[in-house]
Image (cartoon, rainbow, N blue to C red):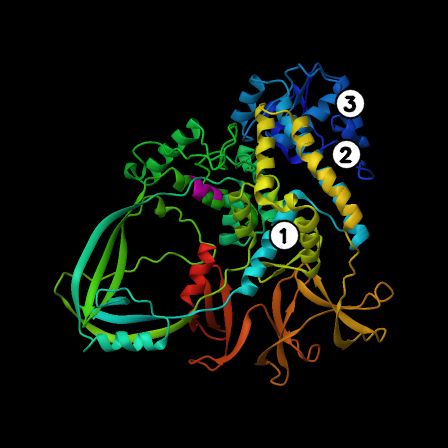
Amino acid sequence: MADSLVIVESPAKAKTIGKYLGSKYIVKASMGHIRDLPKSQIGVEVENDFSPKYITIRGKGNVLKELKDARKKVKNVFLAADPDREGEAIAWHLAHYLELNETDTCRVVFNEITKQAVKDAFKHPRKINMDLVNAQQARRILDRLVGYKISPLLWKKVKKGLSAGRVQSVAVKLIIDRENEIDAFVPEEYWSITAKLLHKGVAFEAKYHSVSGEKRELGKEADVQEVLKAMGGQTFRVTEVKEKERLRNPAPPFITSSLQQEAARKIGFRASKTMSVAQQLYEGVELGKEGTVGLITYMRTDSTRISPVAQEEAKAYIEEKYGAEYNPEQPRVYTKKNSNAQDAHEAIRPTSIYRDPESMKPFLTRDQLRLYKLVWERFTSSQMASAVLDTMTVDLEAGQTIFRANGSKVKFAGFMKVYVEGNDDGTVEEHKFLPPLVSGDSVQTESIDPKQHFTQPPPRYTEARLVRTLEELGIGRPSTYAPTLETIQKRGYVAIEEKKFMPTELGELVIQLMEEFFPEILDAEFTANMEGNLDHVEEGTEDWVKVLAKFYDSFEKRLEVAEEEMKEVELQDEVSDEICEKCGRHLVYKMGRFGKFLACSGFPDCRNTKPIVKDIGVTCPKCHEGKIIERRSKKGRIFYGCDQYPGCDYVSWDKPTGKPCPNCNAMLVEKRNRSGARLQCVSCDYSEEVIEDEQENDQEEQA
């Protein structure tokens, strides 16, 4: 008969743990938090040391009754919520509700849900860590004070339903600042000169480097003509060859932010989807005879630490699978990215490296497999030897000019045999091969190609790039990135166009008001320092009430000024020329999560909406009469269709180009993925690469 009750957050986690613990344990789920601040009021007694007024969350009555009934039947209660601030707070609220003694060793934590890890954790229960609880309380109260004090102001002065928050406001400001940079950007002309050369049957390229010993910039066409003139007869001779060996080290194992970034780059997941699928892998998947097993460690972490046991297992696996030379001389240790001294968590890794993606295929959904493969490959490569590259730099002389060719080849793949980190622009690093060259060699010139370029503005933020920027600024924590990105879209402060964030007029207006009346909330350094203070509370080196008091003193003064001086603002919709076919009023432009759309100006009496269609200048290949227009699905995905619909039902996810295939004369469509763009024939196998400006790719990668 059971003598212990174990409480976790979710049914999936309860199911997995229940199988490990056996019949002496009853395992129940609290379904997340059981108590929170009330939605109807601020719920914080500022004058009473910021005392929170917690209430039972609506709809939790049956769950709590079930937990209390189960509590009466057992001697021991163990609280096994997640191993972070939120999990500790859930455990604390449960202990309060079940009337457990705060000194009881009732708290059980584990970073992975495997049989061994769970059983080991139950051998070492501990007391609830009040430093962790207070750090969570302080964050919750801080966010409540900001949200519930500023939001009513915005409702009164701008429009209902608006909100302001510490992290979300900084995120929106970053997006607006980037848009302002783009608007202010003035393109500058520059040129490049590429020599296409041939030596011993091997083609290669060299780029202009200098003229008369001076590295002159090519700002206009006249500069190019001077270089071409200085080249003389265009006979190229090798003047210098530098060869060296270069080591390339693997990327560290994933933390929350890097997992979200890489999942966006490599498999196109949004941050919220990444966390949802990772939660499934963490809580447990049915593996046939092996039963239910958690496949990855806890996914909300900012630590790159790896347990010695996992490192030893990785070392053995790598030697068995790839050979001893693929193991580094010493196990790799990665330094932490932030200054939080507590490091109880590990990086995100597979719970066993021996469960490789191929063996997991029969048990996982497509999304689960794609994310698991990413985690497995990243971790495995992080424990492998460095790659060794042979690099070659060749200077070639033509008249008074020097052209330079760079090449590399992989001498030893090392970690690259398993995985290479992605780039934000989707490009893949190429290893350009050069023929064997020695000083004095003459090479054959195939062509000299000058090319005009223009500098590109900084790119708009993608989800991956915005998460990385927030992390670099020290804003937010592993649990906050995904919800922040969701909130700023839901509130209508930003929209997504081609997977990139654009500010809306509403977002710009709210941030303008915030900058005027609450500049600290938008100050990245101030917000990062506050995150640091919360970390200090977690470490037990700072008092949570003092942290809140210090913030609230200045915040309250600014609030009083804002209530007196903030003027009411009326948002004016841009009126279109189109008339609503339902009521005859003009349609106006509105901004939604996926960009602009048309809505009736008679809202709420008339709720008619229409997508904004964009003519791409291509005749429909099916009916040959209609024009192809760009549209959006309900989920915001772009597709292309004929404007004669329903008379013509042509539709395509790929962009029709209007260009004929050189092989069969059918239409070419543009296919895009994270590796770039290709033109593909809709009828035969013909395809060709779309050459995009190198400068734009460089800007994308650096931003």
Residue corresponding to mark 3: 68
- The kind of residue tagged 1 is Val
State if disc 1 and disc 2 touch (CB < 8 Å): no
Numbered disc in front, either 1 or 3: 1
**Element on which disc 1 rests:** helix
Q: For mark 2, what is the residue?
A: 37
Front residue of this view, candidates 673 and 448: 448
Q: Nearer the viewer, mark 2 or mark 3?
A: 2
Residue visible at 59% across and 18% down? 125
Q: Is residue 494 above or below residue 603?
A: above
Question: Mark 2 and mark 1: span between their CA atoms?
Answer: 26 Å
* 10 Å crowding of disc 2: few (<14), some (14-19), many (20+): some
Which residue sits at x=44%, y=66%?
455
Q: Nearer the viewer, residue 151 or 113?
A: 151
> Which residue is labeled 1 in the image?
172
Image quadrant where residue 159 sits: bottom right
Q: Which residues are magenta?
A: 375-379
Question: Please, which residue is most extreme toward the left here?
Answer: 440
Q: Secondary structure at mark 2?
A: loop
